[in-house]
Image (cartoon, grey):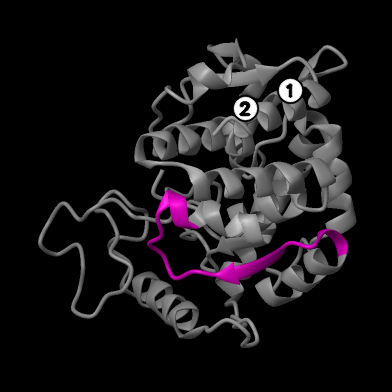
Amino acid sequence: MTRYAPAPPKSPIAAGAGELVPLDPDHPGFRDAVYRARRNEIARMALAYREGDPLPRVSYTPEEEAVWRAVWEKLTPLHERLAAAPWRESAEALSLDRTRVPQLADVSETLRAGSGFRMIPVAGLISGRGFLSAMAENVFLATQYVRHHSVPLYTPEPDVVHELVGHAAGLFHPDIVRLSRLFGEAARRAGEATMKRLELAYWYTVEFGVIEEKGELKAWGAGLLSSFGELGDLQRHPNLVPLDLEVASRTPYDPTQYQKTLFVSPSWDRMVGDVSDWLKTI
């Protein structure tokens, strides 16, 4: 899991001169010069940020704001029906604006006051170890760009929708905060082989975790909760298996497709206990 790392360009024209964020030819914004310039503009803001500085504020365009509203329009009824109760409680406490893209600086300050976590911008490329290790210090590294307007309900890599709707919304809940810290601490201890397993465990829990709640499947993973298509298909998923961290941490995935396997815990408390216990063995 190299988070925020776009796939390597497949053709000589994939990256222009001085481009900070090369896009794969399959990316929805690959042939959109305006979008690519915008991605680089936001990336430069993140690269210029230094610890202790005010977090950069992005003046989102009307087109980007429209994407944000479109996502919420589709996700809100799904969250009401399919999101786990602890995540919904956390999301209600954070209370993200659904009409305009919230500024990372404002969300970070709200999180810091409520749970101790804060958010710091990243331009693009960052390793799984770098991403997870930051959480040991209550830091969530987040992108600020918006997915391409042509497909508002899809993104091939994490964008501000995923970061805020999926992750930040859950970081008010003490259990998610504690698990995030434990992942960070484990990442700082892990050797290379163990790190690969840790990244896979994170993927199948914090990103795509599912629990049973009153006899029904509910999502708590950020990847599911920020993906209209994937969340909507949750209860019809063809391969739901009981959460076993030893198995999950050895199960590869393809981030460009819907997940072939989802791991399900019988309850929220059981999930928290099982993930916590496994991380403490790293």
Residue 226 against residue 109 in the figure, above or below: above
Please state which amino acid type lies under the numbered disc 2: Trp
Residue at coordinates 56% horizontally, 63% vertically from top-left? 142
* Distance CA(mark 2)–CA(mark 1): 17 Å
251 with respect to 246 (left or right): left
Q: Secondary structure at mark 2?
A: helix
Q: Where is residue 119 shown, x and y percent of the image? A: 65, 67
Of the pair 51 and 22, the residue shown nearer to us: 51
Q: Secondary structure at mark 1?
A: strand
Q: Is residue 218 visible?
A: no
Image quarter hosting the C terminus: top right
The span shown in magenta is 114-130
Residue 85 against residue 139 in the figure, above or below: above
Of the pair 122 and 258, the residue shown nearer to us: 122
Earlier in the chain: of badge 2 and badge 1, it is: 1
Magenta span includes 19: no
Magenta span includes 125: yes
Image quarter hosting the N terminus: top left
Q: Are marks 2 and 1 in contact (CB under 8 Å)?
A: no
Residue under pointer 1: 211
Q: Where is residue 243 shown, x and y percent of the image? A: 62, 17
23 with respect to 120 (left or right): left
Q: Is residue 162 visible?
A: yes
Q: Nearer the viewer, mark 2 or mark 1?
A: 2
Residue 227 against residue 200 in the figure, above or below: below
Residue under pointer 2: 278
Q: Where is residue 169 shown, x and y percent of the image? A: 75, 52
Query: Badge 1: few (under 14), some or many (20 or more) residues near its Cα, within 10 Å?
Result: many
